[in-house]
Image (cartoon, helix red, strand yellow):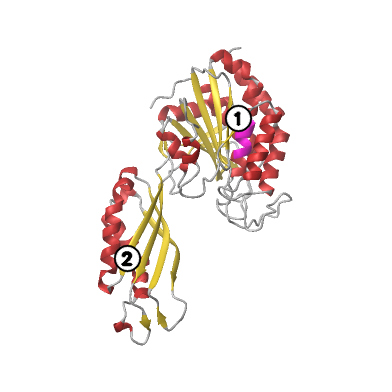
Amino acid sequence: MTDDQLITAVADSLDSLHDLLVEFRRDIHAHPELSREETRTTAAIARVLTEHGIQARLLPGTGLLADVGPAQASYRVALRADIDALPVRERTGLPFASTTPGVCHACGHDVHTAALLGAILALKANEEGLRERGTAVRAIFQPAEEIIPGGAHDAIAHRAMEGVDAVFAVHCDPSLDVGSVGLREGPLTAACDHIRVLLHGRGGHTSRPQLTEDLTYALAKVVTDVPAALSRRLDPRAGAALVWGTVQAGKAANVIPSSGECSGTLRMLDANAWLSVGPLLEEIVAGVVAPYGVEAKLERVKGVPPVVNQVDAIDALRLACGAAALSPAPTQQSLGGEDFSWYLAHAPGAMARLGTRSPGAPTYDLHQGDLVVDESSVLAGARLLALAALVTQVKVTS
């Protein structure tokens, strides 16, 4: 079987899977599960794989791996999808909307999962062609992408990247029409950390703030002044954004509390600046609270480095777009974080942005309860992933 014949056969197999993939995506969309709780989703994936003759290798807790092609391959490609949902209430009104209160697939992971499932099923249906060319493909159905630390570490620790020569993934992009694929060489996402600042001091009555260490006032200064100072101490090209999500202190209007905290995320476009920002952040927090006499403790949970797409891998995705009748489009680096970056520390590869907007339809945003995707994006994503695995024998180099 020639390469062109194999590509055509895989594409035909994907067409025959359309109804199964849409039904599967609707099922897991209706039953979303939070990070590290994806037991039903994992079981559903494993069931479909088993029905199609693919042996699943379960990861501890949730998530799974699946391999097709020769065991002793000359070239192995990994394809990754995240399977977890978000603590967001769905507001789409779809007939298959989430049945889990306060949880929904507001980031498109149901699309990623269904697309990867389609890709591996189509490749399995043409496994003889894979064996002839010595190509193996590993599907990584990864849990817990939405939390820090994420599930990529767990998958890698359990040999998800063992023997892998290249790795690919897609992420839904509701700003792109379905059929379009956003491609970018170099950095695609940002580094992302969780930041928490805890303050302790002598509290007291609000009528006598001079006898206290006014922790509430100091906390307010941390919230406003630390991001401002950080922006003046870093090169603007680092693209740093420290944004708070929670602020907590006290319970009574006339009592200055003795403890309080704020937490948020620090996102940076520049990987080198991210690696060295820790001591500077400590210095700034200490300097901001010093005039108020309170004690400050900075907790920084290092999350993920930027996803940096390798040039040859993007070339492979462009070839896959051509074979899949999809349209490559330029895309910009975002401040979003993605633990796909950890896989790229083990093998070269790339992440593509998968268009999910129906032409002429409203533009939705990720992490919002009203996100609606065009369901034809499932098959588009499956085509892109499956064909990327085939054209990537254009050896991706690190």
Quadrant hosting residue 43: top right
Residue 318 seen in the current view: no
Which residues make up the magenta segment?
113-118
State the residue in front, 278 or 348.
278
The location of residue 309, given as percent across then percent down, is 42, 35
Q: Is residue 294 above or below residue 1?
A: below
Whether the magenta-drawn stretch holds residue 204 is answered as: no
When asked about the image quadrant of residue 64, the answer is top right
- Res 98 visible: yes
Q: Is residue 391 left or right of residue 294?
A: right
Image quarter in which the N terminus is found: top right
Q: Position of residue 335 (x, y in %)?
A: 43, 49
> Which residue corresponds to the image point at 53% horizontal and 16% vertical from the top-left?
134
Between 173 and 29, the one lying in front of the other is: 29
Question: How far apart are labels 2 and 1 at the CA level?
Answer: 52 Å
Kind of residue indicated by mark 1: Arg
Task: Assign the magenta stretch its main secondary structure.
Answer: helix
Q: Which quarter of the image is occupied by the C terminus?
A: top left
Q: Position of residue 147 (x, y in %)?
A: 50, 50
In the structure shown, which secondary structural element does the residue marked by tag 2 occupy? Answer: strand
Point out the tag, 2 or 1, that comes first from the N-terminus.
2
Is 114 inside the magenta-drawn segment?
Answer: yes
Q: Which residue is mark 1?
A: 383
Mark 2, residue position: 296
Kindly state the secondary structure of the residue where label 1 is placed.
helix
